[in-house]
């Protein structure tokens, strides 16, 4: 009798785990795959889920990304309201990348369904069937985000090249018997997921409503004539401890493509992209210094959002670490422009403006792909000078925007991150 009960419970448990209706966040079998819960994927891919859940992809929507959320509320309005439109009466284009499932269904109330708030979830990318390109072949108009792909609403796809079945299969079965998966997976789209096409729907380019170019990562990459795919850096294969319901399994490890997909928000990632050297020559009570920064990436440094920037701080310190001199008073953009690396947007009069209202690019001093640039300094050596240090400091926001966002964003998003440094002792 007890054996029969255990068998029944086992079968029920199997049914609860794999019955289609339990896959979906909104609880009904007829939903498209885009409404499958990330927690469903976690059952078998816990390590990947753990990486993804802390990523900017998981936190891309205006409900979860503080910077994007602040801009969205300022330009569009409340992300918890339905039927939001811009001043021209058009659907908010930013949702096509930041909340793609909502964009697919033409909704703007991002708390209406979990799939909207989850941003770029597992099933958003893994339902890509084909890349249509950044521009519409017939009209020539840009296709942003989810519009750049053919979307499969019934099956999932991935880089393994393996086709899975929803049917139960004998334990320990080997190819050519298909592997079991609770949702159909097609194995003939592997090349897409190993190419830049998997990323360029959102990271290719972006213009504002006035036609001013904002993000241009795709163009920058092509300029570099590089064959390395985005995944080589942003989804490198990593070996991590195996997890079982949140606990590390002692002595067990798995190798996976890193789904944290780190970028400009990640301090470690920004240090990989740039190197800095300093050559000095003393002349009396002055020091001539050549500070060389090199972009080691196949796209501009920094890239992406146009308000990202970095600058050089060159300073003299005494033995106790007290700052005796530095190359600017307020910020290099104001006081030492040769030390500032940024993308300047403005209006027809040549006045710098915020990205949403800009009409053209006024200047671009960022490092181009693989570019090295040397900045020269004549450094006074005050009495007690002991250390000369050069630093490349990376900022997610430009100084005027940081001032506006003070108190509205977490402090760590407003502080510059150290990307590279070099120093000498006198």
Image (tube, rainbow, N blue to C red):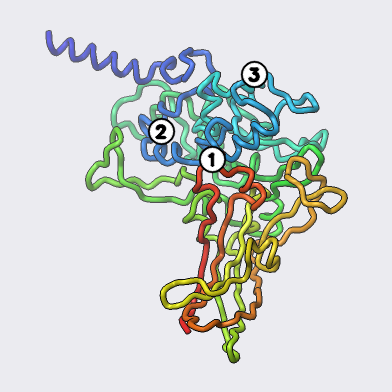
Residue located 60% across and 69% down the image: 293
Q: Residue furthest front?
A: 383
User: Which percent across, then down, holds residue 373?
Assistant: 66, 71
Dot 2 alpha-carbon crowd within 10 angstroms: few under 14, some 14 to 19, many 20 or more: few
Mark 3 vs mark 2: which is more N-terminal? 3
Element on which disc 1 rests: helix
Q: Which residue is mark 1?
A: 190
Residue located 79% across and 45% down the image: 358
Mark 3 vs mark 1: which is more N-terminal? 3
In this rendering, which labeled residue sits more in front, label 1 or label 2?
1
Viewer-proximal residue, 234 or 138? Answer: 234
Q: Which quadrant of the structure image shows residue 66?
A: top right
In this rendering, which labeled residue sits more in front, label 3 or label 2?
3
Q: Which residue is mark 2?
A: 176
User: Which percent across, then down, holds residue 87?
Assistant: 78, 28
Q: Which residue is mark 3?
A: 82
Q: Residue furthest top?
A: 1
Q: Kindly indicate whether the residue at mark 2 contacts the one at mark 1 (C-beta within 8 angstroms).
A: no
Element on which disc 3 rests: loop
Dot 1 alpha-carbon crowd within 10 angstroms: few under 14, some 14 to 19, many 20 or more: some
Viewer-proximal residue, 291 or 58? Answer: 291
Q: Kindly report the distance in space between the C-alpha atoms of the residues bearing marks 1 and 2.
A: 18 Å
């Amino acid at each position: 009798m007890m054996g029969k009960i255990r068998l029944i419970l086992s079968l029920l448990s199997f049914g609860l785990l794999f019955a289609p209706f339990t896959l979906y966040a909104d609880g009904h079998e007829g939903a498209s795959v885009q409404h499958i819960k990330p927690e469903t994927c976690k059952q078998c891919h816990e390590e990947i889920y753990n990486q993804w859940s802390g990523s900017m992809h998981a936190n891309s929507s205006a409900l979860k990304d503080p910077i994007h959320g602040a801009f969205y509320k300022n330009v569009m309005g409340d992300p918890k309201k339905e039927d939001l439109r811009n001043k021209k009466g058009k659907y908010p284009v930013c949702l096509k990348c930041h909340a793609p499932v909502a964009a697919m269904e033409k909704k703007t109330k991002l708390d209406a369904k979990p799939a909207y708030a989850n941003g770029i979830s597992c099933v958003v990318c893994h339902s890509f069937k084909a890349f249509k390109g950044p521009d519409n072949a017939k009209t020539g108009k840009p296709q942003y985000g989810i519009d750049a792909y053919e979307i499969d609403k019934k099956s999932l796809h991935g880089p393994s090249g393996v086709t899975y079945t929803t049917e139960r299969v004998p334990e320990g079965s080997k190819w050519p018997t298909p592997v079991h998966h609770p949702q159909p997976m097609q194995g003939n789209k592997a090349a897409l997921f190993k190419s830049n096409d998997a990323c360029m729907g959102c990271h290719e380019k972006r213009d504002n409503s006035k036609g001013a170019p904002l993000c241009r990562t795709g163009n920058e990459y092509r300029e570099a004539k590089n064959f390395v795919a985005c995944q080589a850096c942003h989804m490198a294969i990593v070996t991590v401890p195996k997890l079982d319901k949140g606990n590390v399994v002692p002595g067990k490890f798995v190798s996976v493509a890193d789904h944290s997909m780190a970028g400009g928000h990640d301090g470690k990632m920004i240090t990989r992209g740039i190197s800095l050297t300093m050559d000095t020559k003393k002349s009396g009570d002055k020091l001539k210094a050549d500070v060389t920064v090199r972009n080691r990436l196949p796209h501009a440094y920094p890239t992406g959002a146009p308000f990202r920037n970095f600058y050089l701080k060159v300073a003299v310190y005494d033995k106790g670490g007290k700052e005796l001199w530095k190359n600017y008073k307020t910020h290099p953009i104001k006081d030492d422009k040769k030390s500032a690396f940024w993308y300047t947007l403005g209006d027809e009069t040549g006045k710098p403006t915020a990205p949403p209202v800009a009409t053209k690019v006024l200047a671009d001093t960022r490092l181009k792909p693989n570019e090295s640039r040397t900045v020269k300094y004549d450094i006074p050596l005050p009495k007690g000078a002991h250390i000369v240090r050069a630093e490349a400091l990376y900022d997610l926001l430009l100084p005027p925007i940081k001032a506006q966002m003070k108190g509205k964003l977490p402090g760590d998003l407003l502080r510059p991150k150290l990307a590279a440094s070099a120093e000498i002792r006198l």
